[in-house]
Image (spheres, rainbow, N blue to C red):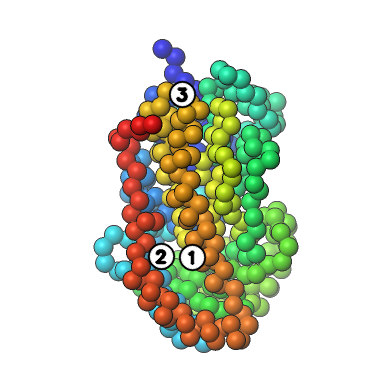
Amino acid sequence: MRKKRALIIGCGIAGPAIAIFLRRAGYEPHIYEAKADHDDYTGLFLNVARNGMRILSELGVDDRIRREGIEMRVMSFRSSNGKWLGTVGDRSGEPQGFTVKRGFLHKVLREAAFREGIPVDFGKKLAHLQMTDRQVTAFFEDGTSADGDFLVGCDGIHSRTRKLILPNGAEPDYTGLISFGGFARGVSVPCEPGTQNMVFGRRAFFGYLIKSDGEIYWFGNLDYPGKPTRKELQSIPQTEWRRVINDLYRDELQPVPEIIRRTESEIGVYPIYDLVSVSTWYSGSAVLIGDAIHATSPNAGQGASLALEDALMLARCVRDIGNLEEAFRHFELLRRERVEKIVKYSRSIGQRKHATNPVQVFFRDLMLPFFLKQANRQSHAWMYDYRVNWNDKVTV
């Protein structure tokens, strides 16, 4: 009996993960990536929360992330004048997650796909799709094409797949913030293992983590007008961004200005968009997962983990439900409520970073310790302790 073929569009996080799970379920996946080559050494960093780490464990790659990443247990907050405002998290028990360079996570997942014998073709930018009752054909801008029984779009927040199969669907929404960051060394700052340091700066938010070898991962958030694209922001020269960012934080207490001064890596700058709700997640023999259908801002640190959950859940549905359309429908039904709740929650966190008016800052610093205590009393188990098991059977 011929194995069903799955075309996977995108080789970031969701793409290799869904390909591996589909291979284990008896399908023949093939990954197509628009970029000309891998991006193992580009981009900034992300968090894989413990719900995502469980999926990486199922894939057999969690140990590499634990060794390379920065363990995350608590977030410590202070104001621009150095006042300590409180912490969120717990130093005991299982870590909330691990912070790792994005390119490293991509590499680990892609190499895991290679070990499973899954082919990855680079330079395959999707142009259009043709679907019949029996197959889907993907046409690429280089003039080539590929046939499959179904297609999974894992091509990110500005998904070409989504535009093709849901031309009237919702578009990503700009949150009003941009994110920027980089990597620094040679800064004399105490390292508290498992701690992410957050500073409500006078003009912009700042956060940093310290790896055991002394490398500092840092990021900032800033209100930015209009609806900037990543390409537009990256067209601004690095010298200009360094001038702007140095000026933003020049009056902050140390180590913030020193971290920026000691940053020799390129500073990455990205607009923060999210995508809360799309009317449907599939059309015909094509389905969307990860950021392609429910992109979340980075504030809750759940984007990668949700993509990994999607991959396992979709593969289970396709494995256990004979009809593809019914499998896609059931996958959407199982996932929609959870992911939309997290996208909204993450955006609400971002909105709390905006205060720069002196009156707003006064009341934020006055009330934040109370809110942090409340947050510690509230359980985030719904987010971090969610479990989806590969061996459980999906029933309609």
Helix, strand or loop status at disc 3: loop
Q: Amino acid at mark 3?
A: Asn
Residues 258 and 311: in front is: 311
Helix, strand or loop status at disc 2: loop
Residue at 39% x, 71% y: name it. Answer: 375
Q: Amino acid at mark 1?
A: Tyr
Q: Quadrant of the C terminus?
A: top left
State the residue position of label 1. 217
Residue at 71% x, 66% y: name it. Answer: 225
Instruction: Report, in whole angstroms, how far the alpha carbon at label 2 lies from the one at label 3.
Output: 47 Å
Residue 183 visible here:
no
Spot the residue most to the top: 1
Instruction: Report, in whole angstroms, how far the alpha carbon at label 1 lies from the one at label 2.
Output: 8 Å
Q: Residues within 10 Å of mark 2 (few under 14, many from 20)?
A: some
Which of the marked residues, 2 or 3, is nearer the chain's N terminus? Answer: 2
Evaluate if marks 1 and 2 touch, with contact meaning CB atoms under 8 Å apart. Answer: yes
Residue 29 location in percent, x, y? 48, 27
Residue at 47% x, 56% y: name it. Answer: 342
Spot the residue most to the front: 396
State the residue position of label 3. 323
Residue 228 location in percent, x, y? 71, 59
In screen coordinates, is 76 left or right of 6? Answer: left
State the residue position of label 2. 211
Residue 190 location in percent, x, y? 39, 77
Which of the marked residues, 3 or 1, is nearer the chain's N terminus? Answer: 1
Evaluate if marks 2 and 3 touch, with contact meaning CB atoms under 8 Å apart. Answer: no
